[in-house]
């Protein structure tokens, strides 16, 4: 059988209270007649179930538990009844006392009201009785006051004399200032005139003593201020007073500032603060009653005109002292090394913080605006030293390399160009970015906001200066290699160095996170425009420098071509190519090697050209014979035949018109659209093509300007042009216009020669082969 469930010995306190006060207990979700705590409890059913299910010992135990609970509940009920009964009794006593007190207060208020009414009646009676005598009392009091003032006036000379004897000048001035109005009022009376004269004599002596104290170098500055206050109270001449005050005050400051400050703290405590005290005292004495300002505490009342004059006088006297302060600051800043810019900045920040404690100097002398200008000058010098010196460093590195490396070693040049970007990036960080980052961390937020725009302009100015300095490189034939290298550096700046610099500036100085998601990533938004502008500028400078140098070199080569047939003696027997032609071809090949080394990203080997050149060297046919058939403009016509083995020597048909043949070649030249002086990109083939065009143009002009062409000249020209044609074959991008231009030169010479006898193809081939072997 199941045992009877354990019953708690104590019911919940809230259940008992609810039953006692007749409050309905919370209804369960479902009525339970077997639950003694339920409102629907059925005792008969519970007893029947208990008798049916439980044994006798459990029934006895349940009965004992119920009896104990009933007794406990009855005890709790008795306790509650007793406690509440005590509270009811206490509340009854309190109400009874309140009723008694209220009745007593009502009687007291009635008595108080009666007394106030009685006092009011007596007050009216007294006021009416004393009214006639009150005016007499006031008149007598006024007379008594006047008598006291007269008594003070009559005793004033003796008091002033006693103060002078005791050295109590402050009290004497107060006495005299107090009596001045009364003496002025009675100045027409003989008695008062004598008193005034006697007092004036004493005060003159006191003034003399005051001036002696002021001029005494041992007098403390605080005592000097007190003496001037007394003189102001004595109505001394204001211009003379403020002039003397500034002279004496500044002289005293100079005596205390004999040694130059060795720190900003010394500069602040020994120079700025004493100067601030002087200006503040001056304002309290002479400038405190300016129109529109409060006159509280002012001593001297000046007119608006005198006020402005006093302020101008003070400012004029302060200027030398302010100059000395800023000179001392400059000396302190300059005493540190150039690398101690953070120390310099901390000095300036100390002065900036100290300016908060010198409001009088700020108001009168505008020292804050002056310090701001000084700070701007220091920041400008900072960016000049760190940023604007970069172009000089770059130019020095370039000049040093090309001065030390006298050889034309393309490997050294290529290594220099490849390493330059790495050096430049490191140089920017060590020279400018890291020092600027350290300085920005030491600056206040307000200083940073003012400095960053100037720094942005400094970076832009640096790039412009660098571009201008590179563009200003001298242009002549001897600087070809240098300027080609500088042009490559400009293209490097345009491609990545400028962008990387502004990325470093953004991340290190503006706190932009590092990311490379887009081209403008890691760039501060306000630097994007500058970045694009500078990249475009360097691309333009690189291209301009390249084309100008190529044009200068082309002009130099052209001049050498023109001198071939002006100065060189043409031998009667043609045995070699003119040395200048071999030199020209050698120079062009050298330029090609330089271009491939300097601009490897644009290099194009043109293997088909070299292959065709080698094949042509193994047979006796001209290179132009094989290529002319591919060019419609060079196809032989009925008016012109090309001799076998010679691509440049025209043979005229009998009866043909020489002028028509010459015009035909000119038409072919223009049909090829050859632009002699067009700009080129930094590709080796394009640069060589530009030089070749200028060289061939020089051949055209030289032949055209030659007054007379004999057979020897004609044959030498035949060998030279055929040599140039074969040598240029591997250098030019488009062989057709090379053939066309050389053909035009040879045709022109053929028509201008009286006896155009040409050499045999075998002789030309032998001469050319020897010279080609020498320059290969």
Image (cartoon, rainbow, N blue to C red):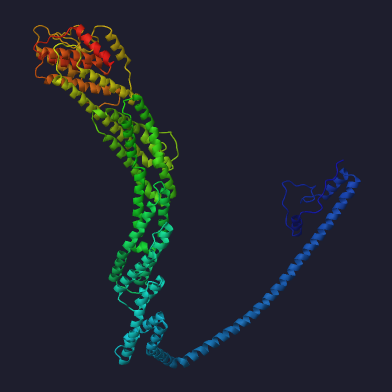
Image coordinates of residue 576 in percent, x first then y, are 20, 13
Quarter of the N terminus within the rendering: top right
Q: In this view, does 153 lie above or below 308?
A: below
- Observer able to see residue 705: yes
- Which residue is at the far right? 56
* Quadrant assignment, res 274: bottom left
The answer to which of 358 and 667 lies nearer the viewer is 358
The answer to which of 313 and 83 lies nearer the viewer is 313
Q: Is residue 709 above or below residue 546?
A: above
* Quadrant assignment, res 360: bottom left
In screen coordinates, is 693 left or right of 15?
A: left
Image coordinates of residue 640 in percent, x first then y, are 15, 9
Q: In this view, does 471 lie above or below 590?
A: below
Q: Which residue is drawn at 27% across and 31% down?
A: 545
Image coordinates of residue 460 in percent, x first then y, are 33, 41
Quarter of the C terminus within the rendering: top left
- Observer able to see residue 599: no
The answer to which of 528 and 573 lies nearer the viewer is 573
Q: Which residue is drawn at 38% across and 30% down?
A: 419
- Count the numbered circles shown: 0
* Quadrant assignment, res 534: top left
In screen coordinates, is 271 left or right of 700?
A: right
Q: Which residue is drawn at 36% across and 50% down?
A: 378
């Amino acid at each position: 059988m199941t045992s009877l469930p354990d019953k708690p010995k104590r019911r919940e306190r809230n259940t008992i209270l609810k039953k006692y006060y007749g409050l309905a207990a919370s209804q369960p979700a479902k009525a339970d007649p077997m639950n003694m705590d339920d409102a629907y409890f059925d005792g008969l059913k519970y007893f029947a179930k208990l008798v049916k299910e439980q044994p006798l010992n459990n029934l006895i135990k349940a009965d004992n538990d119920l009896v104990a609970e009933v007794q406990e509940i009855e005890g709790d009920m008795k306790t509650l009844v007793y406690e509440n009964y005590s509270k009811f009794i206490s509340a009854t006593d309190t109400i009874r006392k309140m009723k008694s007190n209220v009745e007593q207060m009502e009687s007291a208020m009635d008595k108080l009201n009666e007394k106030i009414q009685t006092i009011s009646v007596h007050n009216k009676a007294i006021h009416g009785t004393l009214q006639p005598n009150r005016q007499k009392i006031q008149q007598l009091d006024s007379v008594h006051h006047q008598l006291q003032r007269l008594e003070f006036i009559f005793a004033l000379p003796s008091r002033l004399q006693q103060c002078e004897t005791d050295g109590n000048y402050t009290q004497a001035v107060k006495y005299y200032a107090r009596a001045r109005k009364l003496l002025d009022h009675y100045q027409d009376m003989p008695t008062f005139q004598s008193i005034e004269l006697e007092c004036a004599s004493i005060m003159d002596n006191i003034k003399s003593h005051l001036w002696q104290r002021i001029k005494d170098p041992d007098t403390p500055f605080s005592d000097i201020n007190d003496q001037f206050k007394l003189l102001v109270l004595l109505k001394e001449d204001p211009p003379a007073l403020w002039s003397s005050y500034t002279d004496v005050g500044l002289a005293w400051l100079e005596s205390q500032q004999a040694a130059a400050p060795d720190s900003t703290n010394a500069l602040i405590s020994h120079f700025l603060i004493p100067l601030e005290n002087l200006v503040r005292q001056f304002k309290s004495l002479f400038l405190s009653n300016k129109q529109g300002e409060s006159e509280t505490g002012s001593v001297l009342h000046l007119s608006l005109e005198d006020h402005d004059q006093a302020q101008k006088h003070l400012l004029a006297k302060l200027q030398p002292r302010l100059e000395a302060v800023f000179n001392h600051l400059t000396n302190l800043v300059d005493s540190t090394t150039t690398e101690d810019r953070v120390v310099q900045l901390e000095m300036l920040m100390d002065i900036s913080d100290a300016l908060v404690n010198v409001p009088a100097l700020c108001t009168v002398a505008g020292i804050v605006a002056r310090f701001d200008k000084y700070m701007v000058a220091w920041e400008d010098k900072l960016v000049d030293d760190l940023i604007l010196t970069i172009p000089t460093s770059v130019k020095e590195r370039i000049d040093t390399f090309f001065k030390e490396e006298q050889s034309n070693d393309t490997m050294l040049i290529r290594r220099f160009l490849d390493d330059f970007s790495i050096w430049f990036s490191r140089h920017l960080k060590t020279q400018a970015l890291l020092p600027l980052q350290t300085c920005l961390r030491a600056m206040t937020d307000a200083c940073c906001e003012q400095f960053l725009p100037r720094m942005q302009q400094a970076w832009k100015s640096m790039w412009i200066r660098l571009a201008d300095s590179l563009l200003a490189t001298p242009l002549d034939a001897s600087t070809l290699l240098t300027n080609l290298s500088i042009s490559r550096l400009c293209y490097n700046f345009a491609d990545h160095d400028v962008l990387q610099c502004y990325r470093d500036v953004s991340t290190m100085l503006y706190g932009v996170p590092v990311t490379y998601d887009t081209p403008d990533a890691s760039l501060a938004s306000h630097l994007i425009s500058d970045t694009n502008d500078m990249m475009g500028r360097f691309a333009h400078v690189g291209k301009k420098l390249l084309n100008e140098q190529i044009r200068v070199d082309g002009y130099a080569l052209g001049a050498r071509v023109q001198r071939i047939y002006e100065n060189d003696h043409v031998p009667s027997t043609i045995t070699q190519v003119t040395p200048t032609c071999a030199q020209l071809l050698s120079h062009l090949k050298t330029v090609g090697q330089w271009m491939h080394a300097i601009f490897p990203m644009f290099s194009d080997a043109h293997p088909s050209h070299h292959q065709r050149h080698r094949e042509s060297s193994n047979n006796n046919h001209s290179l132009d014979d094989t290529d002319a058939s591919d060019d419609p403009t060079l196809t032989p016509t009925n008016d012109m035949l090309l001799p076998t083995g010679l691509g440049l020597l025209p043979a005229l048909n009998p009866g043909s018109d020489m002028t028509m043949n010459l015009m035909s070649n000119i038409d072919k030249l223009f049909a090829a659209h050859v632009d002699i002086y067009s700009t080129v990109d930094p590709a080796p083939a394009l640069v060589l093509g530009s030089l070749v065009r200028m060289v061939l143009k020089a051949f055209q002009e030289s032949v055209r300007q030659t007054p007379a062409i004999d057979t020897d000249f004609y044959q030498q020209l035949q060998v030279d042009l055929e040599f140039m044609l074969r040598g240029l074959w591997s250098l030019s991008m488009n062989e057709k216009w090379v053939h066309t231009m050389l053909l035009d030169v040879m045709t022109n010479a053929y028509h201008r020669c009286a006896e155009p006898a040409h050499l045999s193809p075998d002789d030309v081939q032998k001469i050319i082969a020897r010279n080609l072997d020498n320059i290969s």
